């Protein structure tokens, strides 16, 4: 097993980080807004499904 060389490791890390394509501020804001919108729509969907199941069970069980 090769000995760990901290200096070489840091050089490799810097080389890899320089290859990363960072998103623009606009892209970050847009994707964040889309996550909130999709989360809200999913929450509303599951709320309505839960409401329908609960109402159906109440009708069937007569409570």
Image (cartoon, rainbow, N blue to C red):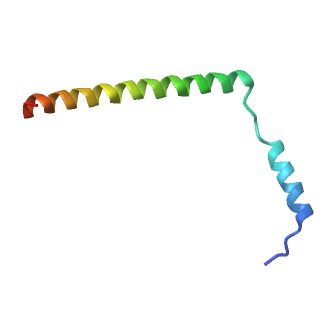
Q: Which residue lies furthest to the front in this view?
A: 63
Query: 52 and 15: which one is in front?
Result: 52
Q: Total number of numbered labels?
A: 0
Q: Position of residue 13 (x, y in %)?
A: 83, 53
Q: Where is residue 34 in the image (x, y as percent from the top left)?
A: 55, 24
Quadrant of residue 23 within the rendered picture: top right
Q: In which quarter of the image is the N terminus?
A: bottom right
Q: Where is residue 17 in the image (x, y as percent from the top left)?
A: 81, 45
Residue shown at 85% from the left, 75% from the top:
3
In the shown orientation, is residue 6 left or right of residue 19? Answer: right
Asked if residue 2 is positioned above or below residue 63 in the image, the reply reads below
Asked if residue 61 is positioned above or below residue 5 in the image, the reply reads above
In the shown orientation, is residue 30 left or right of residue 12? Answer: left
Residue shown at 70% from the left, 21% from the top:
26
Q: Quadrant of the C terminus?
A: top left
In the shown orientation, is residue 45 left or right of residue 60? Answer: right
In the shown orientation, is residue 47 left or right of residue 54? Answer: right
Q: Position of residue 12 (x, y in %)?
A: 85, 55
Q: Residue furthest right?
A: 7
Residue shown at 46% from the left, 25% from the top:
40
Quadrant of residue 54 within the rendered picture: top left
Query: 16 and 29: which one is in front?
Result: 29
Query: 46 and 7: which one is in front?
Result: 46
Residue shown at 67% from the left, 27% from the top:
28
């Amino acid at each position: 097993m090769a000995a760990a060389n901290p200096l070489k490791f840091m050089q490799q890390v810097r080389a890899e980080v320089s290859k990363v394509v960072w998103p623009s501020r606009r892209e970050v804001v847009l994707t964040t807004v889309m996550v909130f919108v999709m989360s809200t729509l999913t929450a509303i969907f599951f709320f309505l499904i839960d409401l329908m199941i609960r109402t159906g069970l109440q009708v069937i069980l007569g409570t």
